[in-house]
Every structure is written in structure tokens, then in C-alpha cells.
């Protein structure tokens, strides 16, 4: 008799694409994010039968249709809740939540807060384009003050939410940022997020070419990016600029960051702050940096693993059952106090 050993075939990014027509607007940043996710899944050797993408409502929420994995297109803002139930029912599943700035931080803000504080083992991708795209351009929780839209014709008078600051405030243990067009960096971030045990929150700056085109040009335009982006790496100095000639340090006598020049007439390199992704206080300082005074921080801003929610749930259930006899259901049903209906 011949014994055949079945092994998992190595999959390419295209193997994670479904047979559905991708129906985003031409030039939408979501195409780039989809490509990065497919590449990350292939690099990770993700098993499609154990991988699930869960979304709410919005342009980003079409994501599950375009992947050859399991997927759930669910209720507005409630994807984290449904994903939590899936993880508790089957902890072996690799679950990704895809949401937008409106879906995730407006109607779904409460659910986002709780999934982060509970530390459920999910990868949460929040596509931030600072606008409601599916409903034709209304302002969103991340829209900047003064944004003119069909729902704010005179300009928004509200201050925006910072998704990463929100995630840190909710107790998120892994918080990162990426730009939709930077494929290599985004793939690396997605793989880091997948390796983290617990809730991983990744904000992706995504350009909406129809309703908010160019909103991130101040730091994503090619001629501005070197001076306006700070790519952080654990254990490395916080340097930026075309030749890494500028950096960040703590302003003497304060807990505030300041931009300094290196080289002749500048500060010595050893005064530059070194990134520590386990330091929550530093992460909070980094998420608050905004152009033009500061560069935008990208990469893994904070990573401090802790026991995941579902691991604690199952451990508690096991502990509750230790030393107890298995109940006799038949004896319970036939004990004194039963009646026969004729």
C-alpha cells in the first residue's frame, strides 16, 4: 500500500484573492491595502480555512468579498463585537477586523473601545480617510476642524479624534500606523500585527480620491515625505529627513518633544531619543505629532503584550470546573417534584 503525505501547498498573494470583481472607485487607496494584506497573508502562510475577515458598513467593509478566506459583512460599527464572539467560540481562528474612521469611531466607537481594553486576539485595520465615502462625503470623527462637507457646509466646528490616541487610551497593547501607498512598510506592519497575541490596532492613512483627495498630502506627497514622515523602529534613534539629519529629543526640563538638527552646529547624536515601543508615554507623545511643526510618526508606536481575553476566559472556565463531579442530568430531571401529564 502506498501512503501519500499531504502537506500544505505554498500560496502566493493571488491565491488569497477571491473571484469577485473589486468595486472601489478607480484610484482608491483600498486597492493598495488589499494588495498588502494579500502579500502579508502569503508571507505568513495563512491557512485560508482558518482565516476570517469581519467588517461593518462602509467602503472598507467590502474587504471580505475580495479575499478567498471566510468573511462576514456585518452590522454598522459592530464588527468588533461579532469578531469577539467568533474568537471565543473558536480561539484557533485567525480573525481580522476591517473598519473605517466612521464605522469604527462613530457608531462603532463603543465596541472599538471594549475590544481594545479586553485585548481580544484580533487584528484590527482602521482605514482612515477623514470622510464618509460610501454615503457621499459627509464629515467623519477624524475630519479636521473646518472640513466642509454636505453635512458641514459651513465647516466642521468639532475637533477630530486621533485613532491611535483613542486606541492607546482604550488600553490597546499594539498600536501602529501605515500609509496606503507604502507597500513594503505596510506588509511588515501587518505581519507584526499578526504575530502579536492580543488586540492589534493598525491605522492606515487611506486617500479617498473622490470625496477627500489629497487630505494627507502634507506628509505623503513625494516631495514632502522625507521631511514629514518619521518611521520608528524599536531601539533606533528617532531620525528623519532626506539624510536623517534631523531628529527628536525631549525638550530640556520638559516632557515635550522637539525637533533638532544634527551635524555641524546641531546637537550630538546621543541626545536623540531612542524609540522604545514598550513605553506607553512615548507612544502617546508620538501619536500627537502633527505637521508642519513635526513629522507624522509611522510604524509600531506601541507594543506591550499581555494575556489575551479569550485565553483568560478559557482559563477561568477550566478553573471553575476543577474538582467538581460531572453532573448527572438524568438524575436532575427525575428527582422529586416531577409530574406526568396525561
Image (spheres, rainbow, N blue to C red):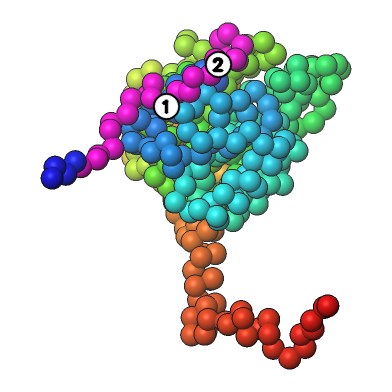
Q: Residue visible at 68% across and 46% down?
A: 111
- Disc 2 is placed on an element classified as loop
**Which residue is situated farthest in the left direction here?**
1
Quadrant for the C terminus, please. Answer: bottom right
- Determine crowd level at label 2: few under 14, some 14-19, many 20+ residues with C-alpha closer than 10 A: some
Coordinates of residue 147 in the picture (x, y in percent): 76, 20
Q: Is residue 81 left or right of residue 318?
A: right
Q: Which residues are magenta?
A: 5-28
- Determine crowd level at label 1: few under 14, some 14-19, many 20+ residues with C-alpha closer than 10 A: many
Is most of the magenta stretch helix, strand or loop?
loop
Q: Is residue 274 left or right of residue 66?
A: left
Residue 124 vs 259, above or below: the answer is below
Residue 32's disc number: none
**Which residue is situated farthest in the right direction here?**
154
Quadrant for the N terminus, please. Answer: top left
Q: Earlier in the sequence, mark 2 or mark 1?
A: 1
Q: In the rendered structure, does residue 14 fall within the stretch colored magenta? A: yes
Residue 22's disc number: 2
- Disc 1 is placed on an element classified as helix
Q: Is residue 50 left or right of residue 335?
A: left
Coordinates of residue 104 in the picture (x, y in percent): 67, 37
Q: Residue visible at 39% across and 45% down?
A: 195
- Can residue 162 be seen? no
Q: Residue visible at 82% across and 27% down?
A: 157
Name the one closer to the observer, 283 or 189.
Answer: 189
Q: Which residue is mark 1?
A: 16
Q: Residue visible at 38% across and 37% down?
A: 46
Name the one closer to the observer, 224 or 202.
Answer: 202
**Labelled pair 2, 1 in contact (Cβ < 8 Å):** no
Q: CA distance from mark 2 to mark 1?
A: 13 Å
Q: Quadrant of residue 226?
A: top left
Amino acid at each position: 500500500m502506498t501512503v501519500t503525505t499531504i502537506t500544505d501547498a505554498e500560496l502566493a498573494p493571488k491565491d488569497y484573492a477571491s473571484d469577485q470583481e473589486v468595486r472601489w472607485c478607480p484610484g482608491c487607496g483600498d486597492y493598495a491595502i488589499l494588495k498588502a494584506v494579500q502579500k502579508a497573508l502569503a508571507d505568513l502562510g495563512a491557512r485560508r480555512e482558518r482565516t476570517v475577515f469581519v467588517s461593518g458598513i462602509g467602503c472598507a467593509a467590502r474587504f471580505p468579498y475580495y479575499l478567498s478566506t471566510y468573511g462576514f459583512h456585518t452590522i454598522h460599527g459592530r464588527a468588533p463585537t461579532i469578531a469577539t464572539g467568533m474568537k471565543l467560540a473558536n480561539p484557533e481562528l485567525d480573525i481580522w477586523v476591517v473598519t473605517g474612521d466612521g464605522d469604527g469611531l462613530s457608531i462603532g466607537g463603543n465596541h472599538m473601545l471594549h475590544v481594545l481594553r479586553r485585548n481580544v486576539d484580533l487584528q484590527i485595520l482602521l482605514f482612515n480617510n477623514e470622510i464618509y465615502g460610501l454615503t457621499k462625503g459627509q464629515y467623519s470623527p477624524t475630519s479636521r476642524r473646518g472640513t466642509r462637507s454636505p453635512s458641514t457646509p459651513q465647516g466642521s466646528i468639532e475637533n477630530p479624534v486621533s485613532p491611535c490616541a483613542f486606541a492607546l487610551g482604550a488600553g490597546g497593547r499594539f498600536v501602529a500606523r501605515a500609509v496606503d501607498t507604502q507597500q513594503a512598510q505596510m506588509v511588515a506592519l501587518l505581519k507584526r500585527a499578526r504575530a502579536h497575541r492580543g488586540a492589534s490596532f493598525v491605522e492606515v492613512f487611506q486617500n479617498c480620491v473622490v470625496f477627500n483627495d489629497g487630505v494627507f498630502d502634507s506628509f505623503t506627497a513625494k516631495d514632502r515625505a522625507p521631511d514629514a514622515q518619521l518611521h520608528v523602529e524599536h531601539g533606533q534613534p528617532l531620525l528623519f529627513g532626506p539624510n536623517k539629519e534631523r531628529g527628536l529629543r525631549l525638550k530640556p526640563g520638559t516632557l515635550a518633544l522637539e525637533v533638532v538638527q544634527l551635524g555641524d552646529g546641531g546637537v550630538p547624536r546621543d541626545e536623540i531619543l531612542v524609540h522604545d515601543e514598550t513605553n506607553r508615554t512615548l507612544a502617546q507623545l508620538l501619536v500627537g505629532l502633527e505637521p508642519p511643526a513635526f513629522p507624522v510618526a509611522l510604524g509600531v508606536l506601541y507594543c506591550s503584550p499581555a494575556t489575551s481575553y479569550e485565553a483568560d476566559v478559557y482559563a477561568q472556565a477550566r478553573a471553575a470546573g476543577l474538582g467538581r463531579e460531572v453532573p448527572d442530568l438524568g438524575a436532575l430531571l427525575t428527582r422529586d417534584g416531577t409530574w406526568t401529564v396525561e
